Amino acid sequence: ELALSDTTDMGMPVTRTLANKNRVLGMLRFYAGMATSIHGQTIGNSLPGEIVSFTRKEPVGVVGAIIPWNAPTAASIWKIGPALATGCTIVLKPSEEA
């Protein structure tokens, strides 16, 4: 459905939008995997004894993303995936030309 929507919206040949489908699915799988592999670190320090420091990854906040009129589905996933994988919220603004 997304491929046909892209074809209708921007006039890209349906064969190309269907080919982009695999790329978009690959991006989604990659970022979904990243969500489970982003962890903090244990860092040794110079204090005597077995004292270590722990780091913790935290979301930075809201991510603003603007996508172009050409290939809106792929561009959306390219911007949404990393933001959600790191726990951030996202405001997505599509092009007014789309």
Image (tube, rainbow, N blue to C red):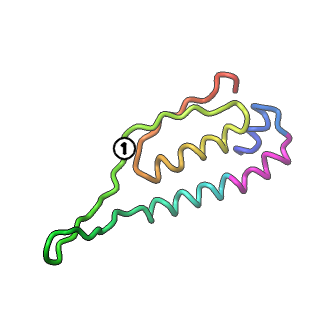
Observer-nearest residue: 49 or 93? 49
Q: Position of residue 13 (x, y in %)?
A: 86, 41
Q: Quadrant of residue 71?
A: top right
Q: Is residue 18 magenta?
A: yes
Identify the residue position indicated by label 1 in the image. Answer: 60
Q: Is 59 on the left or on the right of 1, as rendered?
A: left
Provide the residue span drawn in magenta.
13-23
Total residue callouts = 1
Question: Magenta part mainly helix, strand or loop?
Answer: helix
Q: Quadrant of residue 5?
A: top right
Q: Residue at the spot x=59%, y=60% of the render?
A: 29
Observer-nearest residue: 12 or 66? 66
Q: Position of residue 68 (x, y in %)?
A: 66, 32
Question: Which quadrant would the N terminus be assigned to in this image?
Answer: top right
Q: Is 4 on the left or on the right of 34, as rendered?
A: right
Identify the secondary structure beneath mark 1.
loop
Observer-nearest residue: 27 or 56? 56
| Residue farthest toward the left in the current orientation of the protein | 48
Q: Residue at the spot x=67%, y=37% of the render?
A: 72
Q: Is 14 on the left or on the right of 50, as rendered?
A: right
Q: Is residue 90 magenta?
A: no
Q: Residue at the spot x=78%, y=45% of the render?
A: 17
Q: Position of residue 60 (x, y in %)?
A: 36, 43
> Which residue type carries mark 1?
Val
Within 10 angstroms of label 1, few (less than 14), some, or many (20 or more) residues? Answer: few
Q: Residue at the spot x=20%, y=69% of the render?
A: 46
